[in-house]
Image (cartoon, rainbow, N blue to C red):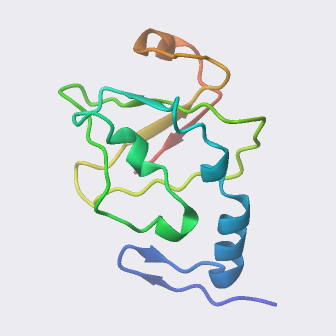
Amino acid sequence: AAMAHGHGPGRCRCCGEEAAERGAAWGLYLRIDRQRLQCLNERREGSGATVFRPWEERGDRSQFVESDDDEELLFNIPFTGSVKLKGVLVMGEDDGTHPAEMRLFRNIPHMSFDDTAKEPEQSFSLS
């Protein structure tokens, strides 16, 4: 069955309920080792960890992370087991503060900015 797609301000209703059920059931949030999650270059200590949240709370705009003087943020996201990444939802303001690019690296424990010179597993433009 074809589904109607509707877009509103700050909201995408693509695939509606089906996507919501998939997001809740398969979300990586439950598989993130939040005690060991690290964000480098965050302006406010601990704010990086708050942007990873359950599917139901994905629209919460009160919790966000900003980079320090440098424009890059680096997240070390350890998982509690093997995971397969199917999708990533990145939310940002519709202005110059939203991320421009996301690069994914895998299996680099305690990654630092020096490691970002390596070839990423995947890279996405977030224009």
Going by the image, does 16 lie left or right of 12?
right
Residue in view at x 56 percent, y 13 percent: 118
Residue in view at x 41 percent, y 15 percent: 113
Going by the image, does 11 lie left or right of 124?
left
Going by the image, does 40 lie left or right of 75?
left
Residue in view at x 17 percent, y 27 percent: 69
Q: Residue furthest front?
A: 35
Question: x, y (%) of residue 75?
Answer: 46, 31
Q: Is residue 124 above or below residue 16?
A: above
Which picture quadrant has residue 68?
top left
Q: Residue furthest right?
A: 1
Question: x, y (%) of residue 15?
Answer: 66, 79
Q: How many marks?
A: 0
Question: x, y (%) of residue 40?
Answer: 36, 25
Which picture quadrant has residue 48?
top left
Question: x, y (%) of residue 23?
Answer: 66, 66
Q: Is residue 63 above or below residue 75?
A: below
Can you say which quadrant of the picture contains the N terminus?
bottom right
Q: Residue furthest left?
A: 69
Q: Is residue 47 above or below residue 53?
A: above
Taking depth in this image into account, of 36 and 88 the one nearest to the observer is: 36
Taking depth in this image into account, of 73 and 38 the one nearest to the observer is: 38
